[in-house]
């Protein structure tokens, strides 16, 4: 059976999601809450989920299901790409079923949900992200729930070597640039410039990369800006819509959010993601750094 896909692309509105949830039970989307905040830890993220979430939504831990174990030398970055089996087990535990759509969301600003979307899509599962997340759902006056959810075990099967989003390592990023591709840094602009670096041991950015912070593409209500604004932000950063694009950030989370914005708004070719990102790049002291 073909894996579930979102008929509206990788981004869904509250109205679209609400309409899908009143359809036949077998076609209703599975809701997955990917609550995540940098440095908060799985326990705090899960506690926030228990406090308030969409009805029937299951919790998916980004650290356990959407990231591999970091290596002692830092190779692979702070959130290495997880094995297919790890992702599949996590999605099944969250109730994701073969043949049913899946919608990821979080409590803002969308980073956890975007990481889940991209990792699943890389492994062949085309899900969607709720634009604006929990805040948009709540702002629409729709009900929320609290406490644990009795989630039936899912049966989703991620294909081995199936078509998915392009994943790059450090060497692949260098080859991408050598072939004329552009590279976008999704971190806040000060970290790109090498200022206020409090997370990674080396400050700066990949030589030749352009700064396009992922969170700059959110509107005041936490929803993604429209295509015109994305194009403007890209061109203002020195990028072009007709060039192959690769994106990275600190550890492959904000990069997924930028990839979502570009793909959802149809801006340029579908981007590749350097998941190891800056935390992987600086694990090798021989790699050049620009500030």
Image: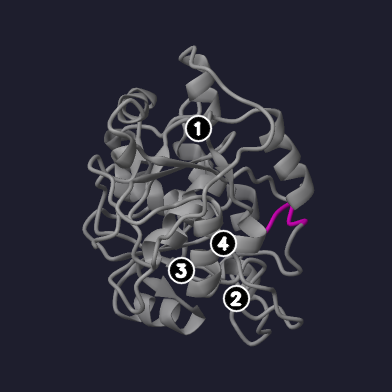
Q: Secondary structure at mark 2?
A: helix
Q: Indicate yes or no whether the magenta region holds residue 197.
A: yes
Give the Cα distance between marks 1 and 4: 19 Å
Residue at image point 29% right, 42% down: 265
Give the Cα distance between marks 1 and 2: 31 Å
Where's residue 177, x and y in %? 37, 75
Residue at image point 59% right, 48% down: 188
- Which residue corresponds to mark 3? 208
- Which residue corresponds to mark 2? 281
Q: Earlier in the sequence, mark 4 or mark 3?
A: 4
Asked whether disc 3 touches disc 1, contact meaning CB atoms under 8 Å apart, the reply is no
Q: Indicate yes or no whether the magenta region holds residue 65.
A: no
- Which residue corresponds to mark 1? 133
Give the Cα distance between marks 2 and 3: 14 Å
Bin the neighbour count of mark 2 within 10 Å (Cα to Cα): few under 14, some 14-19, many 20 and up: many
| Label tally | 4
Q: Earlier in the sequence, mark 1 or mark 4?
A: 4
Residue 21, by quadrant, is: top left
Residue at image point 47% right, 30% down: 132
Q: Earlier in the sequence, mark 3 or mark 1?
A: 1
- Which residue corresponds to mark 4? 66
Specify start and end residues of the magenta stretch as a single range.
194-198
Front tag of 4 and 3 = 4
Asked whether disc 1 touches disc 4, contact meaning CB atoms under 8 Å apart, the reply is no
């Amino acid at each position: 059976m073909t894996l579930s896909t979102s008929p509206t692309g990788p981004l869904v509105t509250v109205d679209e999601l609400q309409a899908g949830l009143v359809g036949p039970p077998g076609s209703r989307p599975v809701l997955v809450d990917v609550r995540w905040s940098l440095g908060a830890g799985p326990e705090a993220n899960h506690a926030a989920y228990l406090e308030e979430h969409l009805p029937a939504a299951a919790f998916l831990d980004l650290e356990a299901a959407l990231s591999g174990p970091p290596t002692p030398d830092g190779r692979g970055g702070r959130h290495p790409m997880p094995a297919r089996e790890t992702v599949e087990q996590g999605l099944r535990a969250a109730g994701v079923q073969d043949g049913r759509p899946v919608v990821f969301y979080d409590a803002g600003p969308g980073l956890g949900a975007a990481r889940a979307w991209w990792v699943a899509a890389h492994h062949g599962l085309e899900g969607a992200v709720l634009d604006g997340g929990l805040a948009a759902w709540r702002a629409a006056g729709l009900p929320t729930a609290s406490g644990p959810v009795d989630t039936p075990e899912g049966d989703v099967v991620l294909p081995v070597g199936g078509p998915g989003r392009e994943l790059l390592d450090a060497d692949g990023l260098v080859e991408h640039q050598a072939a004329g591709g552009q590279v976008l840094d999704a971190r806040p602009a000060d970290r790109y410039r090498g200022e206020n670096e409090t997370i990674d041991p080396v400050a700066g950015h990949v030589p030749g990369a352009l700064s396009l912070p992922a969170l700059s593409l959110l509107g005041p209500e936490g929803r993604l800006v429209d295509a015109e604004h994305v194009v403007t932000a890209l061109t203002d950063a020195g990028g072009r819509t007709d060039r192959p694009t690769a994106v990275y950030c600190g550890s492959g989370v904000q990069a997924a959010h930028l990839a979502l914005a570009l793909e959802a708004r149809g801006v340029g070719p579908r981007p590749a993601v350097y998941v190891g990102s800056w935390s992987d790049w600086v694990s090798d002291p021989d790699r050049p750094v620009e500030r």
